[in-house]
């Protein structure tokens, strides 16, 4: 579950969320937005408590599950139809995830691009198996046509305006922390396509993805990522890291794979005054790289990170 945004970017790239329309009536899923949804867990604070001070939209929208697939041995990918025209998000944001009959509210980053929502009214989530009621429901009970409700939140996003200065991005992901960064990567690709086809819009710089997981089976969205690298070879690059690989790495992945963790040198090699750094992964990883960047004199407003738990 993705939670907590300790540092924010400013201006159009950071902690500004537009005021959403008032809360509206929706189907049965919304009846479970009750006091029990925000009760504290005896084991750990729940998603709503952890993110109580984080900016959210006011709109809670009904959604229907229209796709369920295994993204990896431990991760389910959902595609949701959100017909509500007032529902929108910025690349990198998450949703509060309300499930009928489940009192605990989930918090999951959107991994699709805003363009998919604009064109098809769809969003995608990828949820790792865990002993947490929303994740258990997704892995064990969720089916096609299941009805849920979602509300957008989060101050971790990339949303440049057409006249903003061109920026390079370095995206640093660990495990399922790839989700919001994939949304940002896909959005960057959409901006590149728009610029190429229309000759106008935001001028995207380069994008470098550094992504670490246990092994290649847990590197999520491999094909999607490599497709974007091949589509934009001069603009998008990736380095995929595996820390506990026990099987042979396939020939198609081998050029992109490094065995071992993401290193400080890799990060330092991409520091420039035009570069923004987005980090999402386990708390020790995000703490380490954000401190490393600060010690390398990267301005704090150029470092944005989010932790998942």
Image (spheres, rainbow, N blue to C red):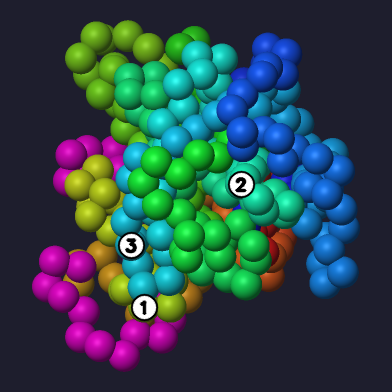
Q: Residue at x 25, y 23 (%)?
A: 193
Judging by the rendered image, the residue that carries numbered circle 1 is 215
Q: Residue at x 20, y 14 (%)?
A: 197
Q: Residue at x 50, y 33 (%)?
A: 63
Looking at the rendered image, the disc whose residue lies closer to the viewer, 3 or 1, is 3
Quadrant that contains the N terminus: bottom right
Q: Single out the residue that lies furthest toward the left.
A: 251
Report, in whole angstroms, how far the alpha carbon at label 3 lies from the one at label 2. 20 Å
Judging by the rendered image, the residue that carries numbered circle 3 is 70
Judging by the rendered image, the residue that carries numbered circle 2 is 99
Q: Foreground: 188 or 74?
A: 74
> Which of the marked residues, 3 or 1, is nearer the chain's N terminus?
3
Report, in whole angstroms, how far the alpha carbon at label 3 lies from the one at label 1. 16 Å
SS type, badge 3: strand
Q: Tag 3: Cα neighbours inside 10 Å, few (<14), some, or many (≥20)?
A: few
Q: Which stretch appears magenta?
A: 229-253
Quadrant that contains the C terminus: bottom right
């Amino acid at each position: 579950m993705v939670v907590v945004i300790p540092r924010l970017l400013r201006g159009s790239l950071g902690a500004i969320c537009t005021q959403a329309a008032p809360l509206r009536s929706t189907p049965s899923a919304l009846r479970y937005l009750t006091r029990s949804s925000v009760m504290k867990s005896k084991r750990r604070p729940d998603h709503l408590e952890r993110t109580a001070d984080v900016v959210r939209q006011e709109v809670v929208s009904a959604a229907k599950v229209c796709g369920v697939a295994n993204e990896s041995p431990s991760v389910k990918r959902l595609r949701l139809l959100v017909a509500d025209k007032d529902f929108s998000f910025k690349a990198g944001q998450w949703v509060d995830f309300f499930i009928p009959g489940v009192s605990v509210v989930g918090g999951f980053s959107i991994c699709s691009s805003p363009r998919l929502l604009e064109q098809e009214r769809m969003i995608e989530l990828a949820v790792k198996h865990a002993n947490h009621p929303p994740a258990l429901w997704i892995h064990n009970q969720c089916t096609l046509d299941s009805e849920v409700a979602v509300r957008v939140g989060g101050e971790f996003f990339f949303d440049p305006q057409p006249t903003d200065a061109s920026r390079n991005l370095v995206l640093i992901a660990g495990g399922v922390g790839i989700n919001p960064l994939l949304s940002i990567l896909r959005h960057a690709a959409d901006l590149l396509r728009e610029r190429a086809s229309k000759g106008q819009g935001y001028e995207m710089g380069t994008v470098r993805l550094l992504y670490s997981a246990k092994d290649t089976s847990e590197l999520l969205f491999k094909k999607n990522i490599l497709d974007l690298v091949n589509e934009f070879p001069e603009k998008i690059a990736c380095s995929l890291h595996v820390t506990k690989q026990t099987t042979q790495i396939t020939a198609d992945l081998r050029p992109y794979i490094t065995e071992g963790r993401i290193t400080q040198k890799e990060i330092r090699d991409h520091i420039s005054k035009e570069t923004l750094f987005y980090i999402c992964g386990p708390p020790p990883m995000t703490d380490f790289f954000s401190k490393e960047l600060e010690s390398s004199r990267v301005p704090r407003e150029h470092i944005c990170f989010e932790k998942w738990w």
